């Protein structure tokens, strides 16, 4: 009876592992990590802080220096985005469109793009 009970427990464990493997996907490499498919709540990406990004790479400072005194924060941000888009050769809209956000979220060096009014 004990052997039969052990077989049932092992079978149940195998079934659970199999079911879990169907509801997960593995990463492309052989890391051994298993990634769970995200639910709707998990699939929402965290907000990207574009203003901090533009500040870090000196686009906001460049915009403030090149716009008239008294320009609104909205005008400064739009000018900074346009400068970023022109610098990377994408459509210059002044808006955070998909192409702009895709570039901003890519890995890159930490050096500023604009140094003393010059693009690098």
Image: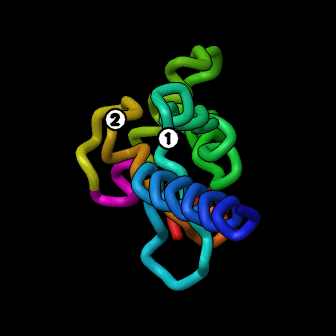
Q: Nearer the viewer, residue 97 or 117?
A: 97
Residue 114 rendering spot, x and y as whole percentages? 59, 60
Is residue 79 within the magenta segment?
A: no
In percent of the image, x 54 and y 26: which residue is there? 41
Q: Residue at x 48, y 81 (%)?
A: 29
Disc 1/disc 2 C-alpha distance (Å): 25 Å
Where is residue 107? Give x, y as percent. Answer: 55, 66
Q: Which residues are magenta?
A: 85-89
Left-right relation of 59 to 29 = right
Which residue is at the front of the view, 24 or 52? 24
Residue 97 in view in this figure: yes
Q: Residues within 10 Å of mark 2 (few under 14, many from 20)?
A: few
Q: Could one spot residue 61 in this view of the protein? A: no
Image quarter (top left, top right, bottom left or bottom right) of the N terminus = bottom right
Single out the residue that lies furthest toward the left: 91
Question: Would you place residue 67 above or below residue 105 in this image?
Answer: above
Q: Which residue is mark 1?
A: 38
Residue extending furthest right? 2
Closer to us: mark 1 or mark 2?
1
Residue 67 disc label: none
Which residue is denoted by mark 2 in the rendering?
A: 97
Q: Position of residue 70 (x, y in %)?
A: 63, 15
Asked whether 87 falls inside the magenta stretch, the response is yes
> In this rendering, is residue 54 above or below 12?
above
Look at the magenta stretch and give its main secondary structure.
helix
Is the residue under label 2 in contact with that under label 1 (CB below 8 Å)?
A: no
Residue at image position (60%, 59%) is 8
Q: Residue visible at 36% across and 60% down?
A: 88
- Viewer-nearest residue: 42 or 45: 42
Number of marks in the rendered image:
2
The secondary structure type at the circle numbered 2 is: loop
Q: Quadrant of residue 57?
A: bottom right
């Amino acid at each position: 009876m004990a052997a039969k009970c052990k077989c049932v427990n092992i079978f149940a464990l195998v079934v659970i592992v199999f079911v879990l493997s169907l509801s997960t996907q593995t990463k492309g490499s052989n890391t051994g990590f298993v990634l769970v498919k995200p639910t709707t709540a998990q699939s929402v990406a965290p907000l990207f802080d574009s203003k901090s990004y533009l500040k870090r790479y000196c686009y906001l400072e460049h915009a403030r220096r090149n716009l008239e005194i008294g320009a609104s924060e909205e005008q400064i941000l739009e000018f900074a985005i346009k400068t970023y888009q022109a610098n990377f050769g994408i459509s210059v809209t002044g808006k955070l469109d998909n192409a702009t956000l895709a570039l901003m979220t890519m890995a890159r060096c930490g050096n500023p793009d604009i140094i003393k009014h010059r693009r690098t």
